[in-house]
Amino acid sequence: RFLRLCHTELKNLRDRARAKGRAGIVVIYDSLEKLRGITANFNDVLRSAEQLFAGEPQHLQLPVHTLFTVPPSLILRLRTPVEFMPMVKLWTRDGQRFPPGFDVARRIVQQRIPDRAALRAIFGADSDEVLEKRLDRVIEWSAGYPRELVRLLRIAVLDAPLDEHKLDRLLGQAGDDYRRTLLGSDMDWLARVRVEHTPSPADETQRQAADRMFSSNVVLRYQNTTEWYEVHPAVRELPALHAAVERLKASQNLAASVPVTPADGQKPLS
């Protein structure tokens, strides 16, 4: 009955729009990407979302064009196509700085604070050179995530004027928000992301780690001709992650150096 009422109301809205000369309506179910549980029921909430978007998709089919946002943690669970809005690419896949991405991020800053003098006052910069360096640090720390960049700007305005010490503290506290979500068992999966730039977990433990890391934006998605993933800057320099990366590289080198012995009757691979 609930679904019938929804369909009826949406058809009525569509027909009213068409009567006014419009092609129809679009309904956007926003903020569903923020759906997440607490520690005690995180997996239960995720399974519920998975059931809704993958197990019972017929309930989402409405008589008008409809867009649903979904929790990023469902990326490894959904078999239905999901379109992502990638982060602004600040680095290439091999870690090289990507200047066009920084230019785009600066335009985001300018849209929020168009007055150059005000921007210099907020960042405590007595020259354009100092301002550019401090903006660079904030943009890098955002990892190309527009929402995070705007959040950092808001904090900067509240704490203005900034100096190097206050900027260090701002970025350090922002990084703590990411590091606080980590468990020691997450490092092996994060190391795979750092080395391979793919989200593929090796086992169920790593998949559960991936669910939480996507939910908290510790891992972010970028796009070239194909998608790739990177760990947030606040996490990349952790000693535990460095150790996990070295372990993974060592195991990959070991696997690559082990000769393959052909079975009886087979020719060795050239």
Image: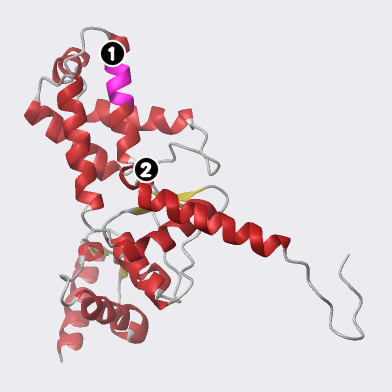
Expressed as whole percent of the image width and height from the top left, the position of residue 178 reads: 25, 51
* 20 relative to 169, above or below: below
Q: Residue at x 30, y 83 (%)?
A: 51
* Residue 65 circle label: none
Q: Can see residue 33?
A: yes
Expressed as whole percent of the image width and height from the top left, the position of residue 208 reads: 34, 72
Of 162 and 247, which appears nearest the observer?
A: 247
- Mark 1 or 2: in front is 2
Expressed as whole percent of the image width and height from the top left, the position of residue 31 reads: 20, 61
The disc, 1 or 2, on the residue closer to the chain's N-terminal end is 1
Q: Residue furthest left?
A: 158
Q: How is the image coloured?
A: secondary structure
Q: Is residue 30 magenta?
A: no
Q: Which residue is mark 1?
A: 130
Q: Which residue is mark 2?
A: 237
Task: Tell me where the magenta segment starts and ends, as one range.
Answer: 130-136
Expressed as whole percent of the image width and height from the top left, the position of residue 100 reads: 46, 30
Q: Residue furthest bottom?
A: 1
Image quarter of the C terminus: bottom right
Q: Residue at x 17, y 71 (%)?
A: 39
